[in-house]
Image (cartoon, rainbow, N blue to C red):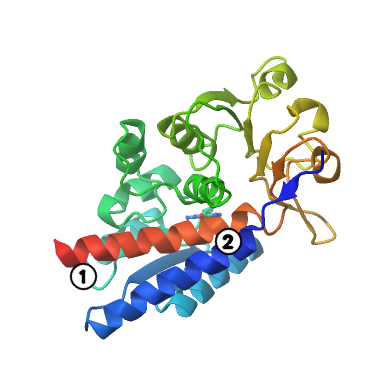
Amino acid sequence: MTAQIIDGTAIAKSLRAEIAEEVKRWQSQGRRLPGIAVILVGNDPASEVYVRGKRRDCDEVGFHSNVQHLSANVTQKDLEDRIQTLNEDASVDGILVQTPLPEHIDEDRIIDCIDPSKDVDGFHAYNIGLLALRRPAFRSCTPKGVMLLLDSIGIQPRGLDAAVIGASNHVGRPMGLELLLAGCTVTMAHKFTQDIAAKIRLADIVVSAVGKPGLVPPAWIKPGAIVIDVGITRGGNNKLYGDVQFDAVKEVAAWITPVPGGVGPMTRIALLQNTLQAARQRQTD
Ligand code: GUN
């Protein structure tokens, strides 16, 4: 079997066009355009690339975006005060603090400061809690993007066995909750998991979110499975690598995402959708 390649770039393009259409409708009704505020701290080149991409997406669909680029020496208090100001700014629908943050900043406390009704990243404990309670509000962008990908290729997850590799707060854990909410039986694999191959090989859907190039070999994959690669690591040659041994795994799987051009563009779509959702809620409150 040779897997069908899931073209996240193309799927994202058509979803972005839908969002742009909706923004045009808002504009014709004289409504305020959705707006997102992004805080970028320091000069991490990867973060700068991500933020530029988010800004470009906002421009393309007609959202306002405002990026505050702060020095790596910013204090915890200054960052918290800035978030408080954005929480109180009625023209801001969504707030995103780009991670990673410098070592001296307590990232959990920063996320706690964001008004949950503006938490378009879906990172706040309140939004993660709602997802765990089957009452999703703002869903974390990468897991939501993966669910949009599955939907766009016509997969009905209910009753399927799913495995998530990696249990991070921003991706692995909410990914497991999303798949559970969609009716999958979910295995979470992490660094303490024993005989990982035997466990992953039972899964109809495998999502790898570790950030270790080449981690997932074909021997871990059940023939005909759907393989979603969330890992993204920049090599010394500046090339991007996923977690999955793409060329070999595609000979076993039924569907597979490439890196780049798989999940990445869908994470950005989820952010746009969340921002639209936040704006809609603020304007109907
Ligand atoms: N760093 C890498 N990806 C993301 C993201 O989706 N949101 C935030 N806040 N930081 C990131």
**Which residue shows up at 70% across the image and 20% down it?**
196
Q: Nearer the viewer, residue 200 or 73?
A: 200
Mark 2 vs 1: CB contact within 8 A: no
The quadrant holding residue 273 is: bottom left
The residue at which mark 2 appears reads as: 11
Q: In this picture, is 214 found above or below 142?
A: above
Where does the image place residue 272, in percent across and percent down from the top left?
A: 43, 64
The mark closer to the camera, 2 or 1, is 2
Q: Nearer the viewer, residue 89 or 284?
A: 284
- Is residue 80 something one can see in this rendering? yes
Q: Secondary structure at mark 2?
A: helix
- Is residue 44 something one can see in this rendering? no
Q: Residue at the top extreme? A: 194
Mark 2 is surrounded, within 10 Å at the Cα level, by few (under 14), some (14 to 19) or many (20 or more) other residues, namely: some
Q: Secondary structure at mark 1?
A: loop
| Residue type beneath disc 2 | Ile
**Which residue shows up at 54% across the image and 52% down it?**
152
Whole-number angstrom distance, CA of label 2 to CA of label 1: 32 Å
The residue at which mark 1 appears reads as: 90
